[in-house]
Each structure stands twice: as C-alpha cells, then as structure tokens.
Amino acid sequence: MPVIVAVPKEVAPGERRVSAVPEVVQKLVKSGVTVRVEQGAGVASNYPDEAFVAAGASVVDRGTLLASAGILLTVLPPPAADLAKLPKGAIVVGFLSPGRNLEAAAAMRDAKLTGFSVELIPRISRAQSMDALSSQATVAGYRAALIGADHSPKFLPMLTTAAGTIRPSKVLILGAGVAGLMAIATARRLGAVVEGYDVRRAAGEQVRSLGAKFLELQINAEGQGGYARELTDAEKAQEAEMVAKAVSEADIVITTANIPGKKAPRLVTKEMVARMRPGSVIVDLAAETGGNCELTQAGKSVRANGVEVVGPLNLASDLAFHASSMYAKNLASFLGLLVGPTGELVASFDDEILKASGLVVAGEVKHEATRVALGAPA
C-alpha cells in the first residue's frame, strides 16, 4: 500500500520554510506515494496551496494530516502534542536537534514513532544529495555576508569617484566550512578584499580558489566527518594571536565555527573587539550554540566600543523560497531509502545512512547522547 507523505505547516516562531515544494511533490507523486500538505504550509515561503494541488498533492487541515501520516516531513519537530497524534509506527524526518530537543524525542519514544534526524546523516559520498546541513549552511553563509554589508557604514568594493578613490572593505571569515565558503564567495562578489581562516589545512585550497587570502597557522585540526577537532590549549593560544591581528584589521568579521554536539568555540574575545575600528561589524553564525564571539547575544545586535556584534538566528528562514527548495530535494533523496519502487514503505531500516540518522526507531531512542539526556543508562 502506498505510503502517505505528510507536509505540515511549521509552527516554530519565525520559521518560514516548508519541508516540500511543488516541484518535489510532483516527483514524489509520480513515484507512487500519496502526498498531503497542510493548508497554508508553503505560504510563508511563497509556495501557495494551489501550486501543491497542481503538483498532485491534497491540501488538508492539520488534524487530518497528522492522523493519516505515514511519513511526516518537517523542518523543525512539531510540538509534542502533535507528535502524539501521529499513528503508531509513523516516521518523522527533519531537523530533530539530537541531544537538545528532548521533549520531541520523548514524545516520539512514548508514541512508538520513528524519527530520522537529518543532522545525523553521515557525510559520505552516497549521502551528499541528502546533506541538509550543507544546503542550509549555504543559505546562511550567503545571508551573513549581506547582513555584514547592510550593517557596515562603508562601501564594500573599491570605487573611483569624483571625490577620490575609496578603498575596498576588508572582510574576514573565520571558519571555512560550507557557510564560510559561501560567505567568502558572496563578499568577493560584493567587491571586498577577503581573508579566510580555518584550523583545517585542507580548507586553504578552497579558500584560495574563491579568490580570498588564507591565513596560515601551522596546525592541522582535521577531525572526523569533515569537521574540525577541538584544539589543545597551546594550539588555541597560537590561533588567538593570529586571529586577534586579523580581526583588528577587518571591517567585517563573519564567524562560522561549530563543533557538532558541543558549545561553539570562542574565537573572538572582548579584548579583540576593543581593538577593532569603530564602525566595524561582527556577524556570528554560531550565536545559537554559544557564539564564536564573547560578546554575542543570540538573536540580538549589540554595540561595544563602536563595534556592532550581530547574533542572527535561523538565517535560512530569511531566504525561505530557495532554502525550502534545497531542503525539500535533500528530503526527497532521503525518502529514496524509506520508500520502495511502488510507493510502499521499506520493510527494514538496515541501510547505513538510516542506521546512522535514526534518533528514535519504533519508540526506542537510538542516539546515545539523547538516551543519556532522557535518563537512560549509557
């Protein structure tokens, strides 16, 4: 029997994305599944109900959607009360915040649901098309560069005018992962002189390929899965000395460093901020996990010594149209592991990607950090 794929309207404050778009819905319907979309689910990201209907989906109210869902595709997990309304054995796929959103994990456990967290999808070649972290980080990096330009009192490009030549702004990107590289590329397109830094040596070639200067530090902090490992105290001291000089010379600093499952590393201290020129801007993409800058306040913009420190949250939601499109394609690729050739649910979750991303399976919490946080023995 074809599985019912359900697309709810996101209810988290400020969340404008939707987990499926008409283009993806059309392909899912052709593959044999039934797609139901909650009324108004895509309006905030500029995908009207009529477009979903034209793509082959049924538009229904929230109660009907939850009660009939076989697979619930979501951006952020619905409230626990909504998860409790899903049929026993239903599957939830989305950003489930493993180890942090304990209420949702407990609700899925208690309702005997299965939840796959896209944050846990392994970074292997076969899973590249499912890498929602990277797709949404691309959006965030682009948006961060625009925020920096918007808050700066200076032009970014060099200009030759009747009033003389205006020198280009200097932009420093700390962290050269997906978000950092996109921020570098965007700042370069805006005409700035750009420097990038990352503790992973392999990132240097990528930074230079985008036309930016790579700050060299004789440390190799390559970790597992393409992420950086945590630095030793001695390495942190070396890093801080070099970064402090670069920060003091920058007009805009964009920080993007994150370590999965841990507090964001501190890269910019208040002493470094004090050395920056008045009018400089810091955009901290790690605000949600503690911030790379000591002065960052999540969701706020603060000023210190004439320097503006911006701690934006959920930047992908700011560009909801394309962020939703990219995310929907990630989920559609992931569904290929859950749905058989005639639209039926697969019999087991033995695939390595499903095993790695399973937060809760048939009511059993599989993710170790979440298990421990919920009070289960390690």
Image (cartoon, helix red, strand yellow):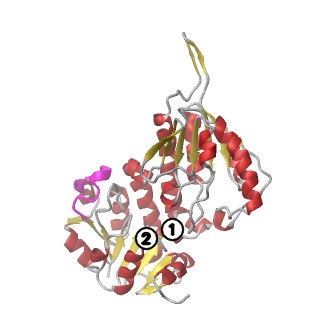
Q: What residue is pinned by disc 1?
A: 119
Is 240 situated left or right of 19 in this image? right
In x, y percent, where is residue 366? Answer: 50, 83
Mark 1 surroundings: few (<14), some (14-19) or many (≥20) residues within 10 A: some
Residue 326 in magenta?
no
- Give coordinates of residue 32: x percent, y percent: 34, 72
Q: Is residue 291 among the parts visible in the rendering?
A: yes
What residue is drawn where x is 29% and y is 83%?
87
At mark 1, the secondary structure is helix
Q: Is residue 152 above or below residue 47?
A: above
Task: Look at 50% across and 55% down and name the residue there.
Answer: 287
User: What residue type is disc 2 on?
Assistant: Leu
In the rendered view, tell whether residue 234 sits above or below residue 319: below
For the N terminus, give its image quadrant: bottom left
How many tags in the picture?
2
Left or right position of 227 against 154 = right
Task: Tell me the quarter of the picture where residue 106 sits.
Answer: bottom left
Image quarter hosting the C terminus:
bottom right
Left or right, 285 with respect to 84, comes to right
Check contact, mark 1 vs mark 2: CB within 8 A: yes
Packing grade of label 2 (10 A; few <14, some 14-19, many >=20) is many
Q: Position of residue 22 (x, y in %)?
A: 32, 57
Query: Which amino acid lies under the numbered mark 1 shown in the image of this protein?
Result: Glu
Residue 358 rendering spot, x and y as whole percentages: 49, 78
Q: CA distance from mark 1 to mark 2?
A: 8 Å
Look at mark 2 in the image and give the residue it sits on: 96
Tell me which residue sits at (42%, 77%) in the image: 115
Q: Which residues are magenta?
A: 38-50
Q: Pick whichever of labels 1 and 2 is earlier in the sequence.
A: 2
Q: Which of 112 and 71 lies nearest the eye of the viewer?
A: 112
Foreground of the two, 211 or 5:
211
